Image: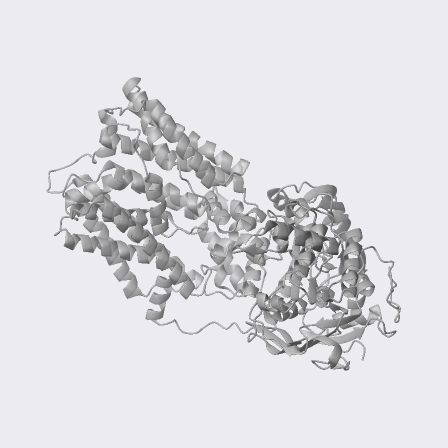
Amino acid sequence: MTGEAPAPGGAPEGDAPGDLVLDMRSIGKAFPGVKALSGVNLRVGRGEVHALCGENGAGKSTLMKVLSGVHPYGSYEGEIRYEGEECRFRDIRASERRGIVIIHQELALVPQLSIAENIFLGHESARRGVIAWPETLRRAAGLLRRVGLDEHPRTRVADIGVSKQQLVEIAKALAKDVGLLILDEPTAALNDEDSAQLLELIRELKSQGITSIIISHKLNEIARVADSVTILRDGRTVETLDLGAPETTEERIIRGMVGRSLDNRFPDRTPRTTPPAPAPALEIRDWTVGHPVDHQRKVVDGVSLRVERGEIVGIAGLMGAGRTELAMSVFGRSYGRYLSGTVLRDGTETRTRTVPEAVEAGIAYVTEDRKHYGLNLQDSVTRNISLASLPRLARRGVVDSHRERVLAEGFRRTMKIRARNVLEQVGRLSGGNQQKVVLAKWILAGPEVLILDEPTRGVDVGAKYEIYTVIDRLAAEGRAVLMISSELPELLGMCDRVYTMAAGRVTGESSRAEADQELLMRYMTHDTAVPAPRHPAPHEGLPDEH
Amino acid sequence: MSTDLGPTPPAATDGGRRRGAAPAVTRLLVDSVRSNTRQYGMLFALGLIVLLFQIWTGGDLLLPRNVSNLVLQNSYILILAIGMMIVIISGHIDLSVGSLTALVGAVAAVLMVEHHLSWPLAVVVTLLIGAAAGALQGFFIAYVGIPSFIVTLAGMLLFRGLTEIFLRGQTLGPFPEGLQKVANGFLPEVGPVTNYHNLTLLLGIGVIALVVNQEVRNRGRQAEFDLAPLPKNLFVLKLVALVAAITAATLLLASYKGAPVVLLVLAVLLVCFGYVMRNVVVGRHVYAIGGNLPAAKLSGVKDRKVTFAVFLNMGMLAALAGLVFAARFNAASPKAGINFELEAIAAAFIGGASMSGGVGTVLGAVIGGLVLGVLNNGMNLVGIGTDWQQVIKGLALLAAVGFDVWNKRRAGA
């Protein structure tokens, strides 16, 4: 009944099927090597706002892609019934014709075009291929009034802020006669005020008879706007709860999201042997970073944290919490606009204004997005491993290619990189082995501080264990490891301490002893520092209204 | 700074047992050819084209005199192709090199013919001018952030215009004899009278010794890294083929006037730039920024400096090509070097470059340039007009890159 994982496909006890708008039954979807969804049920009643909750990678987005035809009929198992009819969408256009419109987190607008042009993109009001401007502008103005956006339809989308762009997206959906509106993390990029406005609009649309599904990490937001919530975990439905019911508590949602499975998937942490140093290996003080385009928006806001030698420290947080942004901005200001803050290494302030300076200061950053920021997929294992250390491997500019290959071969053996040989193209390796190559690259660079960003993302279980072992060994050698992860069990299994972040701020810090998944999830779903109880009260009701 | 992770960490689920026996020889061959399809493919295509024209021209193509000609005719394109390959690997393009060769030729002519500057000094000055022109473009591309296509398109117009201004629309010549000898001449003859050119023979023997030594050493090292070296008989076969090819080329050249001086220049460029791109930090950085710019930046690669250097180098090579071209025709002309940039770009793509950057070798560019050169020369010999030559070269470029794209898609990469 409570947090225990229910049987797969544990469906909500039946409402009368008559007032269901959407009924997705036993949906299963597999990608090569991964089962993303299995036996998922989602039932959405007419005219309700239905929230979809779950950790990163729980399958929320995949489920919505199945619904909207991004994953076409035939590529998934199960049945979708919309308005009582079975649907077999071949693509997004097919689902949009039925009135199901999805608004993605990354907005799908063309910035150089006007609001009106964006609203009718792909569905232009035209006569024999010639745009009927008067009608386009008139209809656009009407839609903008409906979403409460006070802008001229001719305004370029690039000239309005993100929150207004969000409204344009909704207007675009309304133009398609939307019956079921799906919003994926609609407030992730918005500030509090804009978020509130957007949520208000969703309620407004509800009164106009539009059903919505809203994917969100923010529990207070869900409490404010949604009527019911379906929780997903590891590609399965946990349960669907009525938010009006008294037994629906924040506790219960959190427990549903994190589950309770913590098995032996981690190596025993080698006890720290490094003698306590007078100063932490890495200390970040009051670090604040502005959004790369919208400098006013603080993506990282006054973050302070420290990592001792030989310590593994985690940063937990949901999508958009600012963890990667923090790491990348510390690492040679590779993200956003630096506003304030200092970085100290072993107690002395250090310049890390460029990547070479950061590397010089003994800091390494292993990216979460190895394909875009970590590897040259066209090049060999050897050359990828050596890239960050070339100056050190070279004499008067000439790389000692023999030594380079010997070192790469060493990593291939010790880290069990499964490649035919060290000259194999990295693009041909599996995700886990690619990850090991990125890790090897930075270990070779010989840093004192390693920032690992989602070090096991897209990595299979066996390779995960091997990567954990490497991380443990690094700490045992006296290096400081800062590990960003969306997988709470991973943080709890590996870290000595865990910081939590939300909306660019540190919202909590807990030691290995006191941390558990529920506590971390509580910190992660609040924007401001929570004066958290050591042992959260078992039955704390969800606040109804903010 | 220990990089040794010590003994193998205990693995929970290690399925990665080594595959036991050495794979079958055929499998190995297929693998090695597949992983180098483009280069082997182009070498094969070059052989095929040579063979075709050798038969078609009734043996004229590989006459000693024609082989010498082939080298001289294509030297400036090959020099440009080497630089262009590096530019394309870095993820850029350079449209200005044709105009720059003309400009450099013009400046050289003005200096030597009108101002009677000694030719070695003029060479140095013009090379510096080329480097400066390249650096200027590199500055706008790397530091200002204007796309290379735009900057070098502007350069193309700018340098062409300056050429005409310098030459006042006239052809200017002749060049000093010393420079002509370098651009058009052959290595001097030494030693006793044989039927062959002695120095060329010696050079040939030297090259054979170097190549064999290199191959044997590489093979010895391969075993160390699980690289599964070629089986002995295949390796010997490969060596024999290499030696035969070099011997044939040497004998061909030696039975005429010997090796052209520019061939030596080209060989030096090929070896040096090949080495730089493989073994020098800057060369590696060029591949890194072309292959994945954000990843390179996050690895501490100073991408702007590298880009700047790449264009500076291209400018210098364009100057060298311009000097060779002008000296060969013994005059600087305002119409010199038209479409050279396109030939060089075509050579790079035929030789294995990728539009998105990060891929290619200097040797590939030379092979690509030779494919175009042999096509040109062969078609001239059999009397195909320039109109049809263009058509056929266009189709060859399309076929070469099309084959590569198709091959990659089939491999599921």
* Residue B241 location, quadrant: bottom left
Q: Residue at x 83, y 55 (%)?
A: A529
* Residue A275 to residue B121: above or below: below
* Residue at the extreme top: B115
Q: Toward the viewer: A414 or B289?
A: B289
User: Can you say whether A48 is above or below A15 in the image?
Assistant: above
Quadrant location of residue A173?
bottom right
Residue A146, percent from left and from top: 74, 56
Quarter where residue B71 is shown: top left
In the displayed structure image, the side of residue A115 where residue B282 appears, left or right: left
Say if residue A162 shows up in the picture.
yes
Residue A119 screen position, x and y as percent: 64, 55
Quadrant (top left/top right/bottom left/bottom right) for the C terminus of chain A? bottom right
Which x, y percent locates residue A96?
Answer: 62, 66
Residue B28 lies left or right of residue A512; in this view the side is left
**Residue A275 visible from this viewpoint:** no
Give the camera-side residue of B245 and B302.
B302
**Residue at 58%, 52% in the rendered image:** A132
Q: How many marks?
A: 0
Q: How is the image coloured?
A: one colour
| Quadrant occupied by the N terminus of chain A | bottom right
Q: Position of residue B248 (x, y in %)?
A: 19, 50
